[in-house]
Amino acid sequence: MGMPSTVHPVVDDPRAERARYWRFSGLPDTEMLTARFVTTNFTRHTHPTYTFGVITGGVEEYAHPGGTSRVGPGGLAVVGPDEVHTGHAGVPEGWTYRVFYPRPEVVVGIARELGLRGTPAFSESGIDAPEASRLLHAAHLAAERGDRLGASSLARRGIAALLRSHGRERPPRVRTREARPETALAREVLASRLTDPPTLEELAAAVGLGPFALSRAFSRAYGLPPHAYLNQLRVDRARTLLAAGRAPSEVAVEVGFTDQAHLSRHFRRHLGVPPGAYRRALAGR
């Protein structure tokens, strides 16, 4: 008889990362993410949506307008629309989470049913809300199984529970309370010139401020300096085009990046996945 073969167990790579985006048909225009990140370090960025992340393992640490939060298993990482935030591992093994990105009108609609007026905000960012976390986690799993009715029902109940426990009305114009007319004009110029942006000196001259004064006022109003805000606008536009099925190489040029590698570098720092993977996931491929 021959010697028995040796079976080597499969060992999970402790540094392996994975991430998947997809559309959640249970809530209008809502994207979802399930991921494990270890070395990924998200740059300062925003989303036009709310971010409701259920941490399922490890610890996520991130900066946000209210300070810095560390969120572990069962906790919720909550960020409002257009709030500048970061994200990185708070422990060596990284973190895993399941995230909903509902559009503001979806959350506003749920808040209205609860009797809340205005655009909802939250009293904290790293939130301990066990019932909301349980419901949102169950909704995410149901969506992954293709249970649209169960997922949509659970997601709405989870958001409602979070609003009841930690929701509040956002003060009017909270983001732009310190904005000067010149900074709003500068933002419009940047949005209209993604592929041919001005220098800081040219932008400042166009709005009637000095370069240093504009950079300081712009950062105070929008949380990012003009050059970083331009890249945020480019990534946001790229997401829309990729979700529509456009090729990453075409999208890179159309939004003002020099090539696909340039787009991929910024896309990963904002979303944690390369643009091609994002396009395939949202196209259902």
Image: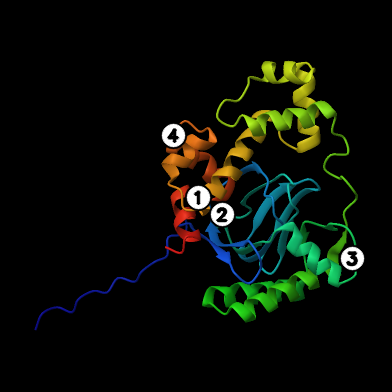
Closer to the eye: label 2 or 3: 3
- Amino acid type at mark 1: Leu
Identify the secondary structure beneath mark 3. Answer: loop
Residue 59 visible in the picture: yes
- Amino acid type at mark 3: Leu
Q: Badges 2 and 3: C-beta atoms under 8 Å apart? A: no
Label 3 belongs to which residue? 116
Label 2 belongs to which residue? 92
Label 1 to label 4: alpha-carbon separation: 15 Å
The residue lying toward the viewer, choosing from 230 and 92, is 230
Label 1 belongs to which residue? 242
Residue that appears at 48% across and 57% down = 17
Residue that appears at 77% across and 56% down = 125
**In which quadrant is the N terminus drawn?**
bottom left
Specify few, some or many for label 1: CA neighbours under 10 Å numbering under 14, 14-19, or 20 or more: many
Label 4 belongs to which residue? 259
Specify few, some or many for label 4: CA neighbours under 10 Å numbering under 14, 14-19, or 20 or more: some
Mark 4 or mark 2: name the one nearer the start of the chain. 2
Closer to the eye: label 4 or 2: 4
Residue that appears at 50% across and 36% down = 254
